[in-house]
Image (cartoon, grey):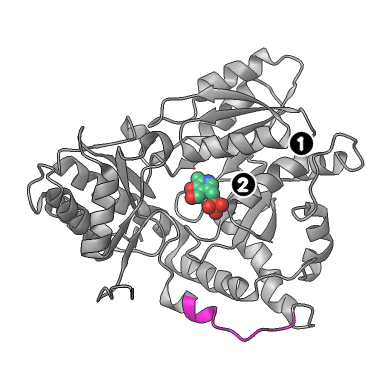
Amino acid sequence: MAATRRPGRNHLFVPGPTNIPDRVQRAMLVPSEDHRSVDFPNLTKPLFEDTKKVFGSTDGTIILFPASGTGIWESALTNTLARTNKVLAARFGQFSHLWIDMAQRIGLDVIVQEEEWGTGADPDKIEQALREDRNHEIKAVMVVHNETATGVTSDIGAVRKAIDAAGHPALLFVDGVSSIASLPFKMDEWKVDCAIAGSQKGLMLPAGLGVICISPKALKASEALRGHNDRLAHVYFDWQDMMKQNPAGYFPYTPSVPLLYGLREALACLFEEGLENVYHRHHVLGEATRQAVAAWGLKTCAKEPKWNSDTVTAILVPEGVDGAKIIKHAYERYNLALGAGLSQVAGKVFRIGHVGDLNELSLLGAIAGAEMSLIDNGVNVTPGSGVAAASSYLRENPLAKS
Ligand code: PLP
């Protein structure tokens, strides 16, 4: 049976992949080219420098892998750690869970700090665990900056302070998949050793480019493991292979050339807007979404304002209502894609992604569609209430800071 045509545009409000600006789409429409040509480094060399800016780094080294964020998790762990090494990780949502699961399956000994979903990493508990680790057996602390499943942002600056207060040498690995290029990220200031990003969120590209920014300390750790018997096996994600070729502007294997052109244009978009404005815009759009949720009489999954994420809001549906039905109806009836509840919160939440290339009116479309779907599914919401609350907030708070 032929698929039904849905007229008008699809409103994509999952928290990644995000909407791609038209000029970025156009920049990716390129003929195939020789990635070993003399011209190719003109495209690639500036990318390594420019990409660092969205990580808040000058000291770091950027590697661009043909991968999604999950591949970059693996790259960070396998290049720096040895089999049975201890790592410390907080679990408070599906993505922190999946990263921990990967670390365990790779052969690491993970000390898991369980946090309630809707909260985030607890710097005090991290400090305590590190203080108790007198022999410095813990080699790395893993934190998901923005837990996309629950709409929770953790305070990475506070985690860094906790590590320093404990006087512990552990590496700090941060998953910034749904924060980098949308929320303030200060790799050098926070002394993050591996910062992990994917192309399909704040970078406003299709999935397929995994980005890691590596500190000098993490590079040293990976060099120290060369030839080590307990080194975790890795080939495709080896940093050294990349670093032999990248300085000259080349790759050890075939890169996705259109994605590299797309990255160049996406970075140009971000820098033209100004990163401070990008962060401010995400804050305003996040706050407008929260105003709508409050006006509906609903609550966010984030338990306290300090956990609020400015890239995604997970909205708790009332008891007895299936969040999955609200999402399905919004998609089928209103051509609006909302984010699903994952794992522990499946059916209990729906998510509005407000990350990437969007503005007031695009967000209001999503809020209107979510509101209509809630009402159609019997949730007691006053028609227009969310749109009114969000729009009055947006009228008072311009998206651009400067
Ligand atoms: N980490 C976070 C916080 C995410 O939101 C996601 C995906 O949504 C991932 C990791 C996994 O990234 P990918 O789907 O690009 O492999």
Residue that extends furthest to the left in the rendered view of this protein: 382
Q: Which residue occupies the foreground of this view, 180 or 87?
A: 87
Q: Is residue 289 above or below residue 24?
A: above
Observer-side mark, 2 or 1, equals 1
Q: Residue at x 40, y 66 (%)?
A: 19
Given residues 273 and 248, the one toward you in this image is: 248
Residue lying at the far bottom in this picture: please name it: 31
Q: Main secondary structure of the magenta part?
A: loop
Magenta stretch, residue numbers? 25-34
* Residue 345 screen position, x and y as percent: 36, 36
Outermost residue to the front: 1
Image side of residue 235 versus residue 98, left or right: right
* Rendered location of residue 349, percent (x, y): 30, 41
Residue 245, horizontal then vertical, whole percent: 82, 65
Task: Give the labeled residue for mark 2.
Answer: 195
Q: Inspect the image, locate mark 1, and give the three-letter code of the amino acid beneath it.
A: Leu
Residue labelled with disc 1: 81
Query: Residue at coordinates 69% horizontally, 72% vertically from top-left?
Result: 44
Query: Which residue type carries mark 2?
Result: Ala
